[in-house]
Structures are given as C-alpha cells and as structure tokens.
Amino acid sequence: MIPQYIRKFLWSCDWKKMDLSKNKERIILNILNIGDIKAAKWLFKTYSKPVIKKVLIDHGAHGELNDKSLNYWTFILDVDQTKLSKLLDFYFRCRSNQII
C-alpha cells in the first residue's frame, strides 16, 4: 500500500494499481527526483540501500532524474562516478544520434 503522503510524487501513475515490488523502479525514481525528506525516509525504510542504488545506476542516467537530483543521490549513495559517467556518455551519444 502506498501511503497518502507518497502518492503526490506518483502523480503520473495510477497509485491504486501500483505494487511496491513490481513498480519499485518508478516509485524509487520519482521519490529520488521530486520527493521530500519525509518521502525519502519512507523510501529507505521500504527499500534497501543496495536496491535504491541499483535503480539509480540502472535508470538514473537515462534522463529519469534531473541533473541536481542525479548528482545529489549519486553522492549520497556513493555511486562510482566512472560507472555513471559511462552511462551518461552513452545516453547523450544515443540522444544526439536520435537513437532514443
């Protein structure tokens, strides 16, 4: 069940149909990107740090997070910048070639 105070960060989704396990990427990314401190605390109680970090690495560099959020959470979660830099380089190369 998605708490009431989290639902506003999932405005683009039908939160009634969301499953904490099946939709974890969308939930995690939305809260990392636009969530407040209360939502972040809920996020870290709901999902483990390794799970949140994996979602950030796998999806955060693909335009899912704004630059400030991506930089902040990369620092907070101690993500290897070289790993993320390679993903960002690939993403921007694809974008400039209109592959994505």
Image (spheres, rainbow, N blue to C red):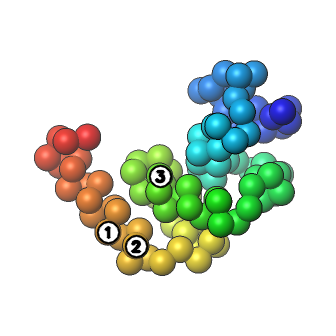
Gap between marks 3 and 2 measured at Cα:
12 Å
Q: Position of residue 20 (x, y in %)?
A: 73, 39
Q: In which quadrant is the N terminus drawn?
A: top right
Pointer 3 or 2: first along the chain: 3
**Toward the viewer: 52 or 66?**
52
Q: Residue at (20%, 56%) from the top-left corner?
A: 93
The disc, 3 or 1, on the residue closer to the chain's N-terminal end is 3
- Which residue does the image show at 55% across and 69% down from the upper left? 74
Q: Which residue is mark 3?
A: 59
Label 3 Cα crowd, 10 Å radius (few <14 / some 14-19 / many 20+): some
Give the SS element for disc 1: helix
In the shown orientation, is residue 97 left or right of residue 28? left
Q: Is residue 27 visible?
A: no
**Would residue 81 be found to the left or right of residue 97 on screen?**
right
Pointer 2 with pointer 1, Cβ within 8 A: yes
Tell me how far mark 2 sits from mark 1, CA to CA.
Answer: 5 Å
Which secondary structure, mark 2? Answer: helix
Mark number, residue 83 = 2
Q: Would residue 29 be seen by someone viewing this image from the given angle?
A: yes
Q: Position of residue 64 (x, y in %)?
A: 47, 46
Identify the residue under disc 1. 86
Specify the quadrant that holds the C terminus.
top left
Mark 1 surroundings within 10 Å by alpha-carbon count, few (fewer than 14), some (14 through 19), many (20 or more): few
Residue at image point 44% right, 76% down: 81
